[in-house]
Structures are given as C-alpha cells and as structure tokens.
Amino acid sequence: MRTAPLTVQARTDSLERLRRSTERDSELDILVIGGGVTGAGIALDAVTRGLDVAMVEAQDWASGTSSRSSKLVHGGLRYLQMLDFHLVHEALTERDLLISKLAPHLVKPVSFLYPLENRVWERAYVGAGVALYDTLATASGTRRAMPIHRHLTRKGMERMFPDLRHDAAIGAIRYWDASVDDARLVETLVRTAVSYGAHAASRTQVLDLHTTTGGAVSGALLEDLETGERFDVRARAVINATGVWTEKTEALARSGGGLRVLASKGIHIVVPRARIQGDTGLILQTEKSVLFIIPWSRYWVIGTTDTPWHQELTHPVATSADIDYVIEHANAVLARPLTRDDVIGVWAGLRPLLQPGTKEGTSSAKVSREHTVASPTPGLTVIAGGKLTTYRVMAKDAVDFAIGSRATTLPSITHEVPLVGAEGLRVFQRQARAIGLRYGWEQHRMDHLLHRYGSLLGELIDLVDARPELAQPLHGAPAYIGAEIVYAATHEGALHLDDVLMHRTRLNYEQADKGVGALDQIADLLAAELGWDAATREKEIEAYKARAKAEHEAAEQLDDASAEHVRLQVPDLSPMQPLEGVATPGTGTGSVGPGAAGSAGTTGHA
Ligand code: FAD
C-alpha cells in the first residue's frame, strides 16, 4: 500500500478539493467535522467504502479529548459491575482487533493488579468478574490477543509491585488490557485515511452549516485558520464528530434538534518511572470510579478525576486541588508516598458526556450505553459519546446512518484494514537488532521507534540516511532523535511547534520543563522544513514558552475558574473562531445570526 505523507502541500491540495466541491458535479459524498479519534475513524471508514470524503479539524489533529485520555484500550472492567456485558464484549473485541491486526505497533498489552482487601468474598467476587472479562474477550471466537488473568498471593503481589504498601492488600488479581498514545492513534488514522484518498485539513474550522430551503444541510462555511480565508463547501452528507463541541456545531444547522452533550473533566499526573517500583499497572477503586497507575516506558501516568466543567472547551486545565486528589488516592496504596515535587507533568481532558434523550425533532439511529448517532435535520448526522477504544464501531455506525440504504451495498470494511505502519511490522521487528547496530540505536530506542512508527520506520531511516546527524538524540529531550522532529513536519502534518510538543511527541507532559530545554533545536529543525523565517521561529518559541508557563501557573490555582483564567492569558497562534455572527463569503447561502449563535452557546455548561 502507498502511504501518503501529511505535508503542508497535501493540506493545501485538500483545501483546494474542498473549494472545488461547490462546482457542478463536484460535491463531496461526506464532510466530517472534527479530527479527533471519532472524526478520523469516520474518514477512514467512509473512504474505504469508496466514498469521496473530506475531514476538517479546527485545531491540530487530536487537540480535543483524543489527546487527553487515560490512553487505555480496554473493555472497561468497571462496566461489568453495571452488568453491561454487550458493551464490554464490544470494547474487548475492538481492543484485540487493534492489537492483533489493525495497529499492533501502537497498541500494546499492559497488565494491571487489582489489589484485594478481603481474602475470601472479594477474591471470589473480583476473580469471577475478571474471569468473565477474559471470557468476553474471546467470545467472538478470535484468537486470544493477550494472557489471561492470574491470582497472586501477597508475596507474589509484592514481588511484582514492591512499592505497594504491605498493609494495602492481602493479595491481588493480575489482568491484562492495553495502552496507546492517543494522539498518535488519531494521526495514524488520518494518515491511513489520506493514503486511501480522503482529503484532510487541520486548522480548518466549520463556521456555519448551509441549509436548503427545506432545512436540509447541504454544506458548510469553512475558515482556513492559518490564512483567515473563508470559503464554502458542498457535501451530500455532513457528519458532526466534535465531541464536547457537539451542541455548538449542531446549532449551526438551526433546526433546534440534536444531541445533548456535557463536559466532565478528568486529569492525569505523570511521575518518573524510577519513583515507583513496580512491573505492572494498578487499578484502584475510588468513591466515584477507578484510579489507574499506568506504566509507560519512562514514566507512570496516574489518573483520573471526574468533575463537571463549566469553562471554555479548548484549554481545559488541572488545578492544584485536582492534582492533590490524584496524589492522595495513589498514596493510599503506595509505600513511598508521592509529593507535588514528584509530578513532572499534568494534563486535563473533557469527557463528552452524552445526556439521555435527544432534542425535539431528532431521529436517532443507534443508542448504545456509550454512544448515539442521530440526525437533527436531513443531511446532518451527529455522533457523540463513546470512547477511544470503540472509535471503529462509532465510525461504522455514523457512516451507515449518514449514507442510509447505500450502507447495504457499501458495508464497512475497516475491521480488515490495518493502519499505516502495521503491515510489515514483523519484518522490522526481526531486523531491529541490525538496524540498531547500523545507526547506533540501543534496544530501548529501537523499541521506542518501532512502537511509534511500525514499518513506517523505513521512512524515518530514509531521512537519517540523507542526513546522518538526525540519528542523534535531541540535546534537551534525549528520548527523541532529530529525525522524529523532521518527520513530524514532513510526514505527520505538524504545522506549529505546539503540534510537535503536544501531539507528535508528548514532551509537554513527559518532562518537567515541558520540553522548553529542547525548543531551540526543535524549532531549528522545523523552521528548515516549514520555511519559517527568523521572526516566525521566534514567535513560535515565545508562544510555546508562554503556554508552558501559563500551564504551570494554572496548576497552582485552587479552582477551575482561576486556573482557566491564568491559562487563557496566553492566546493561540491560530485560535478557533467564536461562532457568533459569522459572515459567509456569498454563494447564496445563509449566515448565522446572533440568535442562532446564542442557542449554540447554550450547551448546559453555564
Ligand atoms: P474530540 O477528540 O474532542 O474531537 C473533536 C474535535 O472537533 C476537536 O479536536 C475539536 O477541535 C474539533 N472541532 C470542534 N468544533 C469544530 C469546528 N467547528 N470545526 C472543525 N473542528 C471542530 N477512552 C478510552 O477508550 N480509553 C481511555 O482510557 C479513556 N480515558 C479517558 C480519560 C479522560 C480523562 C477522558 C476525558 C476521556 C477518556 N476516554 C477514554 C474517552 C475518549 O478519550 C473520548 O471518548 C474520545 O477521545 C472522544 O473523541 P472525539 O473525536 O469524539 O472528540
């Protein structure tokens, strides 16, 4: 399969295709709004059915919730307590499909200990639940993708997790799930979709939806946020996959219908791997939900929280109270308690919480406990809820609904379409030692590279062969080599310094300095690829430094409003536009009036 790079030119070409959609016989089959995991999954689903599809994302790919999750690909052990077997089975099937076929380079098995406080009834109760979890994973008849659970005595548990407090548990059950770099999954989905012919433009916002006189949605008004240019686009079907922005986006159709989605904040903290001695993750029950202590290569990720969010949606931030809550709950079982000084990184994300029922006049196609597909008006499909793990099922449901009866002759085939980097992975795994020796990369670096790129590592090696200095680690961020930064711009659609530090790498939370110590070198590498002059380079650096400082200061605040106030002191370089009173460029379509914008703003957050 030919793998298309996400270049600046590819973005320009996609925008050009979008512009041409208003010409005769050129309208798109589907326009997808939102480049999180749901939108990217929809674009891939649609293009692999043979449809002409375009996807636009107002920020960088995955900037919304899809880069801010717990990064687990899981069935959700806690849903078993709610007896939702179908949901767990569906998610476990997706988990195993991703690991075994679709994205084995990105999605990795990770084990968790469930510590037990009671020797008899709890071991029997939790043991039965975990056994069922394992059984549901194989209920579809596919080969087991990971080991089955095991019961551990206190001794066995302490061997596996020496930093678990002796009196915290009498033993444990070890079970398996999986983890993924969420932003990377999204970028890989976008690249796969584009490789099959989808058109994709980041930093391109839908400002308005166009409707026919009968009220059907027929297209949209877009703004290229990099240039400020506005233009119209026509599509037979528009799919709204905008997560916590769902209500704002569906209000642009002015039908009054749609889904109700609230935002709930969850935060995670990051501590160095050496700070906690343990070879596995932990899952802990909290008053409201569960807390995960998740091992990553160089650090632990600990979270999460669940609190209503009433601020703006673009830059959710953690408060000092959130961080203290997570530390306190982790310390309940850790032998060497964590303090604020151990925390090297933090992030906050907003869950798109689907509210029961739909707005008046909305036909809804599929309601699962987790996600719903609905149509507030003909031509517009809205999908919301769900989770990262089940993005493929959500995408299938949304496209089935949007294309109606054509779905019978054009069924989804994404269950048999590996994402880019998956094919040929095993060959690269076998060649890893030889590649490492040739380029001076130790095993941990080869693991890191294969995990991030899979068989696309060949493209990275091409860069290194042309410029051998790119094989070297970055001075201020040695986990990454120079070629990864260049590749982010030449193949992965990064347009700004932010995109590289937030999503292509995760330096924003992986290092206590948020990657600031590596900024000069990263900016030099990007400037050469993206054609930045000295002033642009400086502006990018200053903007990121200001952002990093504001995030640090926000995390010192006690409440959401104060933290958000501090964070918003630093503007984005190409900010999302407010949807109030947007003017169209004049192709005979309507414009959004302040009334409509007002209702768009009423998302229940106030
Ligand atoms: P988003 O990722 O938010 O994407 C919507 C996109 O739409 C945004 O990027 C936004 O910029 C864009 N947009 C908005 N308006 C416009 C416009 N007008 N024009 C163009 N673009 C627009 N799931 C799991 O499976 N496993 C987990 O471990 C897990 N952990 C989680 C932990 C937390 C704390 C949270 C908050 C969620 C977690 N989830 C998890 C759930 C999962 O992350 C989300 O369900 C999923 O990422 C939502 O993706 P989305 O594409 O629907 O929304």
Image (tube, rainbow, N blue to C red):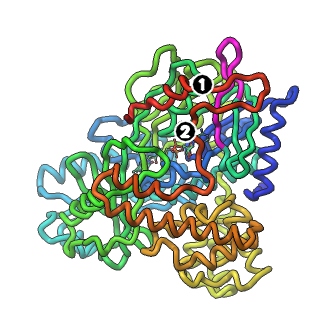
**Label 1 vs label 2, nearer the camera:** 1
Q: Mark 1: give few (<14), some (14-19) or many (20+) Cα within 10 Å.
A: some
- For residue 364, above or below residue 412: above
What residue is disc 1 on?
A: 593
Mark 2 residue type:
Thr
Mark 1 residue type:
Gly
The residue depicted at 71 percent of the width and 17 percent of the height is 212
The answer to which of 550 and 290 lies nearer the viewer is 550
Give the residue furthest to the top.
Answer: 214
Assess mark 2: CB under 8 A from ligand 1?
A: yes
Residue 366 visible from this viewpoint: yes
Query: Split into 4 quadrants, where in the image is the C terminus?
Result: top left
| Helix, strand or loop status at disc 1 | loop
The residue depicted at 26 percent of the width and 40 percent of the height is 81
Residue 174 visible from this viewpoint: no
What residue is disc 2 on?
A: 242
> Residue 523: percent from the left, percent from the top?
65, 73
> Residue 228: percent from the left, percent from the top?
71, 46
Asked whether, in this view, residue 117 is left or right of residue 29, the answer is: left
The answer to which of 88 and 291 lies nearer the viewer is 291
Alpha carbons under labels 1 and 2: distance apart: 21 Å
> Residue 46: percent from the left, percent from the top?
68, 37
Whether the residues at callouts 1 and 2 have beta carbons within 8 Å, the answer is no
The image quadrant of residue 310 is top left
Asked whether, in this view, residue 557 is left or right of residue 125, the answer is: right
Decide whether the magenta segment is chiefly helix, strand or loop. strand
Asked whether, in this view, residue 423 is left or right of residue 34, the answer is: right
Query: Split into 4 quadrants, where in the image is the N terminus?
Result: bottom right
